[in-house]
């Protein structure tokens, strides 16, 4: 890569928070940035002090790059901070969860209910032989039992490792064996688009692949129970008779018998809280490790300030607890703040494409946190769905997961937020544990497509390939590689069982900073614009162009719903731009439109970025977390045998695209 990343797409719109929002914001004093920066350990300490401790820490930070220890000497429990302390403070009647299943069933849990259930479950785990430090895998659909399982592990000091309910038997076995888990918590199934996904059967297949450390499987009856009471629902494909005696235990047959009293284990600040696997584009998944006190400090502070959480809020983060977003911004961060939140099990288009908006209307959701891929899907479905619902309760919108195209940002703001809600575009990673770059909604004016500034106390800058700090040597505006150059409390503590890979992946490219793997630019006002993974930056005739910018230019055209852009090897230019385009519902593909779109990119960005190839497609290959797999598109475009497709949400999509590409080349 040449010295800096050329950033060609200009986005000049800017939105200041309304006076009304500023007046009520949890934080609206901009001097917080300087004060947190000048004493960042003191800043994080002030947030640690808001947690409940069995014993306060001796030392705030021990930092021997790349190993950080925060709040050492302290004793604390994550479940206590998420649940018990609210009940002890007389707030047990507050609603914690409003849980909606896909079939429409609803359950409400107060904090007192959660405390009762989590203690019973924790006692059941103990009866199954689980103790401090043991690993427990959780393979459940989004809902109360998933959150309870995480919290019950935390309560007794067991390490949880959630495996997203869309992963295969093979992926489960790989994760279970990597960490030597003793127990798997699962369900008979979950609902997805009206169909039952038989979780327990998939777990059985995983166990057939040999998982020698697993002693028990705890099964929650989800589908069976609701199936009995919901007319016309798909029948459960797993029943009690199929459980293997001695190994398999039904939730209600053990949990219901337990006492509702189970003391919290006093954990060291640096005791492991969870392992969460994240799949890189190559190699086996990495077991990212997060510990207790620093993680809680980072997630509770960011939840409170980024989402401006108030007692009056009904918060809804649409992420599943199978991902880090569900760990940090469904369970630990929001619950440490005693929030009332919605948990939704299913798909956004079941029974119809307005399901999300109906949920917001039904429960009076005030804060919505979702992903750009979802927003673009809603745009494609059409405005009529949100327009048909009352969304006036919303007051703040958030996004996470990938760069949000300015067009999607504006749509989110206007159609969902009614023009009144600030948008927080939050950049972070499984590895960072908590939000790192984001607006504070009562302080920072937003620009569509920019995650704006580092969260107070966090420090980031832009390096070149050789590790020069371009902000120092070059000044702003500048583009290059995003690094975090100061430790933060919720940072990963390593990769389970592979210290060398931890050093290699994050700390070897630069000697003095954490390499995030993303490209970014800093504009003339010091705002960060994330440009996607460095692997996704193209080198066209000597210019670094971000695939994300070309995608945004395409989505800017009124007929385009979504696009994916890649750099394809080219004899002369090094790489040429190839685009895959999904059109909006009512638009039909044509040669004219193809030319028009190529020209549109040239007008928006410059002739350099004009796609040589442009294909219309109905779907794009995505991971189960909704990220476009550009690596596969490069394989297709360059006529290679396709790499690993096991993490694809829908493998059929790739075959269809490959056929189209070969027709053209042939
Ligand atoms: C990668 C981390 C963090 C929770 C979900 C993803 C991309 C994430 C943004 C954003 C631009 C973003 C980055 C990052 N990303 N949020 N607001 N703007 N890019 O967690 O699976 O660990 O992925 O997601 O490329 O490195 P993850």
Image: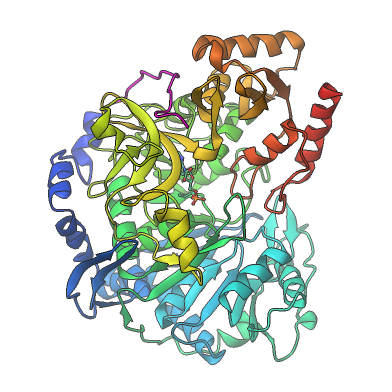
Q: Position of residue 610 (x, y in %)?
A: 59, 15
Is 567 part of what is drawn in magenta? no
Viewer-closest of 551 and 80: 551
Q: Position of residue 302 (x, y in %)?
A: 31, 52
Q: Position of residue 522 (x, y in %)?
A: 33, 30
Q: Can the viewer see residue 52?
A: no
Viewer-closest of 393 and 452: 452
Which of the colour schemes (rainbow, by chain, secondary structure, one colour) is used?
Answer: rainbow
Residue 51 sits in quarter: bottom left
Q: Relative to 461, does residue 406 appear above or below in the rendering? A: above
Q: Main secondary structure of the magenta part?
A: loop
Marker count (numbered): 0
- Where does the C terminus fall, quadrant-wise? top right
Residue at x 63%, y 22% (from the top left corner)? 576
Viewer-closest of 79 and 535: 535
Residue 441 sits in quarter: top left
Q: Can the viewer see residue 388?
A: yes
In the image, taking residue 578 as reference, residue 19 lies left or right, namely left
Residue at x 20%, y 74% (from the top left corner)? 57
Q: Position of residue 120 (x, y in %)?
A: 48, 83
Q: Relative to 240, does residue 648 appear above or below in the rendering? A: above
Highlighted range, magenta: 1-15
Residue at x 18%, y 40% (from the top left corner)? 28
Is 3 part of what is drawn in magenta? yes
């Amino acid at each position: 890569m040449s010295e800096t990343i050329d950033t060609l797409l200009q986005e000049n719109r800017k939105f200041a928070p309304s006076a009304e929002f500023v007046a009520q914001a949890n934080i609206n004093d901009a001097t917080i940035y300087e004060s947190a920066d000048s004493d960042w350990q003191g800043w994080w300490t002030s947030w640690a002090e808001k947690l409940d401790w069995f014993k306060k820490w001796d030392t705030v930070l021990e930092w021997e790059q790349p190993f950080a220890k925060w709040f050492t000497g302290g004793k604390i429990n994550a479940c206590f901070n998420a649940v018990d302390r609210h009940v002890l403070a007389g707030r047990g009647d507050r609603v914690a969860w409003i849980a909606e299943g896909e079939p429409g069933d609803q359950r409400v849990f107060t904090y007192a209910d959660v405390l009762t259930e989590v203690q019973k479950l924790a006692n059941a785990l103990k009866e199954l032989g689980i103790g401090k430090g043991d690993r427990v895998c959780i393979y459940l659909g989004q809902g109360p039992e998933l959150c309870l399982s995480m919290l019950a592990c935390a309560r007794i000091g067991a390490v949880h490792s959630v495996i997203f309910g869309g992963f295969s038997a093979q992926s489960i076995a790989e994760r279970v064996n990597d960490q030597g888990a003793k127990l798997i918590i699962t369900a008979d199934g979950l609902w997805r688009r009206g169909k039952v996904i038989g979780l327990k059967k998939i777990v059985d297949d995983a166990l057939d692949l040999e998982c020698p450390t697993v002693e028990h499987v705890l099964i929650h009856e989800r589908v069976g129970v609701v199936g009995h009471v919901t007319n016309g629902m798909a029948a459960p494909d797993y029943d009690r008779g199929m459980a293997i005696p001695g190994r398999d235990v039904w939730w209600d047959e053990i949990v219901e018998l337990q006492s509702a009293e189970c003391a919290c284990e006093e954990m060291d600040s640096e005791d492991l809280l969870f392992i969460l696997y994240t799949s890189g584009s190559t190699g086996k998944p990495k077991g990212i490790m997060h510990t207790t006190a620093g993680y809680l400090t980072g997630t509770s502070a960011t939840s409170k300030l980024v989402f401006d959480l108030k007692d009056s809020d009904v918060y809804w983060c649409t992420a599943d607890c199978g991902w880090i977003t569900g760990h940090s911004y469904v369970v630990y961060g929001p619950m440490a703040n005693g929030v009332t939140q919605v948990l939704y099990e299913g798909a956004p288009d079941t029974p119809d494409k307005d399901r999300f908006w109906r949920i917001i209307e039904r429960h009076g959701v005030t804060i919505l946190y979702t992903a750009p891929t979802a927003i673009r899907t809603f745009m494609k479905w059409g405005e009529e769905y949100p327009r048909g619902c009352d969304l006036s309760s919303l007051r703040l919108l958030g996004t996470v997961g990938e760069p949000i195209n300015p067009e999607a940002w504006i749509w989110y703001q206007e159609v969902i937020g009614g023009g009144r809600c600030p948008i927080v575009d939050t950049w972070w990673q499984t590895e960072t544990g908590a939000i790192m770059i984001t607006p504070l909604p009562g302080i920072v004016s937003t620009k569509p497509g920019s995650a704006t500034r580092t969260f107070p106390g966090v420090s980031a800058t832009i390096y070149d390939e050789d590790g020069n700090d371009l902000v120092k040597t070059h000044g702003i505006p500048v583009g290059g590689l995003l690094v975090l150059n100061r430790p933060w409390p919720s940072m990963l503590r390593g990769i389970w069982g592979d210290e060398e890979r931890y050093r290699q992946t994050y700390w070897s490219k630069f000697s003095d900073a954490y390499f995030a793997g993303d490209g970014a630019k800093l504009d003339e006002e010091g705002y960060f614009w994330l440009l996607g993974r460095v692997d996704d930056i193209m080198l066209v005739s000597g210019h670094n162009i971000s695939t994300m910018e070309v995608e945004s230019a395409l989505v800017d055209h009124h007929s385009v719903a979504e696009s994916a852009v890649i750099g394809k090897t080219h004899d002369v230019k090094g790489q040429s731009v190839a685009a895959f385009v999904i059109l909006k519902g009512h638009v039909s593909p044509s040669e004219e439109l193809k030319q028009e779109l190529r020209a549109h990119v040239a007008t928006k960005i410059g002739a350099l970025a004009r796609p040589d190839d442009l294909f219309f497609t109905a779907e794009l290959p995505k991971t189960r977390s909704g990220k476009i797999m550009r690596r596969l598109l490069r394989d297709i475009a360059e006529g290679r045998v396709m790499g690993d497709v096991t993490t694809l949400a829908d493998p059929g999509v790739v075959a269809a695209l490959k056929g189209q590409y070969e027709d053209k080349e042939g």
